[in-house]
């Protein structure tokens, strides 16, 4: 028994000696943190979440479809382990209509004061005001890309976080009443802030008092086949480091054909109100078509914004890129 103890002691010393010889003293060099790889974003799952939203019909405030889809999103975040906040509010549209709306918020790792904000709008446009036929312009659209795609990506990210959380705290917000802005057929003058009503409300009344985040990422129209994401103007001015981080992760992950190294002008969107109201640096990942006069896809604000336009490959590019960013934070 004593012989065995001596042998073990000698062997341990030998290993220690070898370790000391092969590992030089690093002195006061900084410690490099090692992060676990981000989970694999499931594009089929995200596609299903987009489709399930569209199946409710147009998600216009005050409609049956809108209420049913809101309940679906709430249950989804609960199922994925988020701490839930629901802001119920009555908002005033550009034409004076009173809109029953809900901002739906899911939070993860709530004890961590360093937070990342991910958001999209879940309502759909009440007007197809870009349809060529005036007879169809006053009817609501499916909004498969414009609304449902960003939410579908974030639902899949929520599912992944529920299974394996990143180190950072994450808040996911589905903003309501983003797309109730003044239609192109309206000739009377109205307030210019008719868009993004839900994010305007949240910026004044965050779900957590004095809410702050390190940065925010907005997903808007992120599901189309062959989408191109340029660096949006407000994002570059107010959060250039986040833009470069996201576009760099996209390039490193093999999605450079979607995330292009070009800059476009400022786009009125939810991120602007989050920046203005909460002073959180935010970026907007949004599909932009430089060949189109209005800058967006041909089906934008028409009845052609359907599931036919949605691509699993694009959902994958956006979802995996965002996950690579938040899991390496």
Image (tube, rainbow, N blue to C red):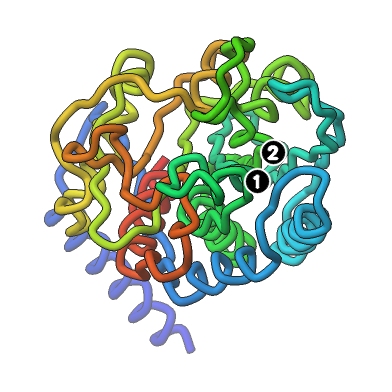
Identify the image quadrant of residue 65. Answer: bottom right
What residue would you read off at disc 2? 176
Residue nearest the observer in this picture, 244 or 60: 60
Residue 71 sits above or below residue 291 on the image: below
What residue would you read off at disc 1? 123
> What residue is rendered at 47% in x and 45% in y?
301
> What residue is rendered at 52% in x and 16% in y?
275
Residue 207 sits above or below residue 20 on the image: above
Residue nearest the observer in this picture, 77 or 8: 77
Residue 36 falls left or right of residue 314: right
Secondary structure found at label 1: loop
Residue 271 sits above or below residue 219 on the image: above
Report x, y in % for residue 132: 40, 47
Q: Residues within 10 Å of mark 1 (few under 14, many from 20)?
A: many
Secondary structure found at label 2: loop
| The disc label shown at residue 259, or none | none
> What residue is rendered at 56% in x and 40% in y?
119
- Can residue 165 be seen in this snapshot? no
Report x, y in % for residue 101: 80, 38
Residue 132 falls left or right of residue 154: left
Q: Residues within 10 Å of mark 2 (few under 14, many from 20)?
A: many
- Can residue 169 be seen in this snapshot? yes
Residue 26 falls left or right of residue 326: left
Residue nearest the observer in this picture, 13 or 93: 93
Identify the image quadrant of residue 121. Answer: top right
Mark 1 touching mark 2, by CB under 8 A? yes
Quadrant housing the C terminus = top left
Of the two numbered discs 1 and 2 on the same chain, state the one appearing first in sequence.
Answer: 1
């Amino acid at each position: 028994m004593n012989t065995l103890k001596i042998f073990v002691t000698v062997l341990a010393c030998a290993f220690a000696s070898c370790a000391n010889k092969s590992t030089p003293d690093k002195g006061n060099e900084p410690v490099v943190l090692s992060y676990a790889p981000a989970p694999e974003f499931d594009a089929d799952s995200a596609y299903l979440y987009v489709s399930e939203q569209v199946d409710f019909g147009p998600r216009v405030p005050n409609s049956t479809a809108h209420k049913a889809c809101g309940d679906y999103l709430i249950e989804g975040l609960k199922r994925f382990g988020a701490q839930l906040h629901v802001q119920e509010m009555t908002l005033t549209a550009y034409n004076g209509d009173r809109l029953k709306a809900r901002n739906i918020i899911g939070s993860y790792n709530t004890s961590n004061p360093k937070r990342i904000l991910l958001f999209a709008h879940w309502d759909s446009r009440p007007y197809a005001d870009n349809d060529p036929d005036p007879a169809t312009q006053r009817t609501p659209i499916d909004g498969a890309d414009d609304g449902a795609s960003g939410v579908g990506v974030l639902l899949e990210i929520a599912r992944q976080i529920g299974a394996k959380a990143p180190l950072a705290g994450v808040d996911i917000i589905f903003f309501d009443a983003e797309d109730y802005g003044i239609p192109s057929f309206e000739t009377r003058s109205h307030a210019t802030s008719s868009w993004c009503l839900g994010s305007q409300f949240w910026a004044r009344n965050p779900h957590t008092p004095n809410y702050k985040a390190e940065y925010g990422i907005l997903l808007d129209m992120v599901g189309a086949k062959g989408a191109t994401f340029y660096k949006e103007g407000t994002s570059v001015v107010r959060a250039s480091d986040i833009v470069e981080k996201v576009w760099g992760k996209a390039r490193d992950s093999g999605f450079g054909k979607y995330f292009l190294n070009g800059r476009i002008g400022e786009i009125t969107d939810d991120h602007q109100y989050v920046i203005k109201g909460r002073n959180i640096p935010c970026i907007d990942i949004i599909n932009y078509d430089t060949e189109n006069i209005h800058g967006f896809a041909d089906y934008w604000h028409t009845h052609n914004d359907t599931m036919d336009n949605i691509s699993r490959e694009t959902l994958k590019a956006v979802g995996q890129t965002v996950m690579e960013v938040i899991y390496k934070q």
